[in-house]
Image (tube, rainbow, N blue to C red):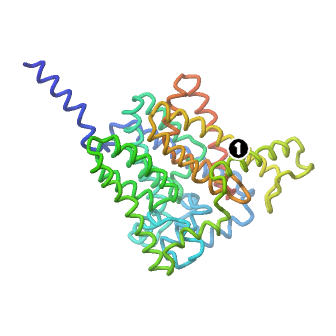
């Protein structure tokens, strides 16, 4: 009898994670990883700012004083570039710049605006807090999801690889990456546990955070299709795209154009390629080849990929590294599909295909590392592939080196994407 009771208790414990989402931080290695990685990145940014301050961007002081100054440089350092748009929307809405601001979706600036008003108008501080809280929860949920898919050891590696990814500095900056990552991981985790209404809610937040969230819908639909209650699951998931209508209604109310978010991409020099993602990949390859030729020619040679106001050697380094990330992401997408299943592979593939279909005119693979940052199946796949001590050490070492360079660039107001 005792044996039967013991077996029954173990079965109930095994089923328990499917009925609720465990957010107890003390039980997750993700908390420790998040804390030490964020502190290290923050310290690195402050050191770079004080050590290399004379080498900052020539316009850095003006930008700091104009719209990215709040409580002091220790916190203000996490507002750069697009942070100004998020803070502007959080404080003044989309009417402040109806042509370009709608490219930044409303969920993140809405949270920043709400918390900023609670904090007495400290919107930049609010942005950092929102990013840190969302990032912490994203780490915890990613560990939970990875643990049930690839095991505890691989789950820990996946979170470490995410924490040290070269674009991971955006997870504490006044950017929307943390909120999007949280909502994307939560949508998958809820779907895996059969909580379709919750999955739809998380997907709705993702759709209202970044355009690339549309990549979530086919992946979640695949998970719903496998559900014993297929019709109910699909019907509940349909609430996510329906919720996106809130954004056109908001734009209609604030700027009089419900489709302003679609037209805003033209203002940021992105256009749909006739070849879809193949077009972006091809232009990225062209830019990378031009970059290699530029490195061979040196600073005094012919300019192979001319970009206004950009040093040819810098352009070469950016284009080569972006294409290298594309090759890495493509390989990890294949691994994710094979080892984790079609839903994870579909999401990773579409999360890359969307920005590739809208290449930038000047930099074909602009911001690709940031797009890869929130395609979380890539990190699960990397944890599966780099499972030996030697491979893991190599991943951590290379990532840390590139992350350090990115943090220095960020601190000095050099463009990081």
Q: Which residue is mark 1?
A: 321
Residue 49 in view in this figure: no
Location of residue 86 with respect to 10 vertically, above or below: below
Quarter of the image holding residue 84? bottom right
**Quadrant in which the N terminus is drawn:** top left
The residue drawn where x is 48% and y is 63% is 125
Place of residue 120 in the rendered image (x, y in percent of width and height, measured from the top left) = 42, 72
Residue 157 in view in this figure: yes
Location of residue 203 with respect to 117 vertically, above or below: above
Quarter of the image holding residue 148? top left
Could you tell me which secondary element the residue under label 1 belongs to?
A: helix
Considering every residue shown, the one lying at the far left of the view is 1
The residue drawn where x is 60% and y is 44% is 166
Place of residue 73 in the rendered image (x, y in percent of width and height, measured from the top left) = 58, 61
Callout 1: 10 Å neighbours few (<14), some, many (20+)? some
Horizontal arrangement in the rendering, residue 373 relative to residue 121 (left or right)? right
Q: Is 406 in front, or is 52?
A: 406
Place of residue 258 in the rendered image (x, y in percent of width and height, measured from the top left) = 49, 75
């Amino acid at each position: 009898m005792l044996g039967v009771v013991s077996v029954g208790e173990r079965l109930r414990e095994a089923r328990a994670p499917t009925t609720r989402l465990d957010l107890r931080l003390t039980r997750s290695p993700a908390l420790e990883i998040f804390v030490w990685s964020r502190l290290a990145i923050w310290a690195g940014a402050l050191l770079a700012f004080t050590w290399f301050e004379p080498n900052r961007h020539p316009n850095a002081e003006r930008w700091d004083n104009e719209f990215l100054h709040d409580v002091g440089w220790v916190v203000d350092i996490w507002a750069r570039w697009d942070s100004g748009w998020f803070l502007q929307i959080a404080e003044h809405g989309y009417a402040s710049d109806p042509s370009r601001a709608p490219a930044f979706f409303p969920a993140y600036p809405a949270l920043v605006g709400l918390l900023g008003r609670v904090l007495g108008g400290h919107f930049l501080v609010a942005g950092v807090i929102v990013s840190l809280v969302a990032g912490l929860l994203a780490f915890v949920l990613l560990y939970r999801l990875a643990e049930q898919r690839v095991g505890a050891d691989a789950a820990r590696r996946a979170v470490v690889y995410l924490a040290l990814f070269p674009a991971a500095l955006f997870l504490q900056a006044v950017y929307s990456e943390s909120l999007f990552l949280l909502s994307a991981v939560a949508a998958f985790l809820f779907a895996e546990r059969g909580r379709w209404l919750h999955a739809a809610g998380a997907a709705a937040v993702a759709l209202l955070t970044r355009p690339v969230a549309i990549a979530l819908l086919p992946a979640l639909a695949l998970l719903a299709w496998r559900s014993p209650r297929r019709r109910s699951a699909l019907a509940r998931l349909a609430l996510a795209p329906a919720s996106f209508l809130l954004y056109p209604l908001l734009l209609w109310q604030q700027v009089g154009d419900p489709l302003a978010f679609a037209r805003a991409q033209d203002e940021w020099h992105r256009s749909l390629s006739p070849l879809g993602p193949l077009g972006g990949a091809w232009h990225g390859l062209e830019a990378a080849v031009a970059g290699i030729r530029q490195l061979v020619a040196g600073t005094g040679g012919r300019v192979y990929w001319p970009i206004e106001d950009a040093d040819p050697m810098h352009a070469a380094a950016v284009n080569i590294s972006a294409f290298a990330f594309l090759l890495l992401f493509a390989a990890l997408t294949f691994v994710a599909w094979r080892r984790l299943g079609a839903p994870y592979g579909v999401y990773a593939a579409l999360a890359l295909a969307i920005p590739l279909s809208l290449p930038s005119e000047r930099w074909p693979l602009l911001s690709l590392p940031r797009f890869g940052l929130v395609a979380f199946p890539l990190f699960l796949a990397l944890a599966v592939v780099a499972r030996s001590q030697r491979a893991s050490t190599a991943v951590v070492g290379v990532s840390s080196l590139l992350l350090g360079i990115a943090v220095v660039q960020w601190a000095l107001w050099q463009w990081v994407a």
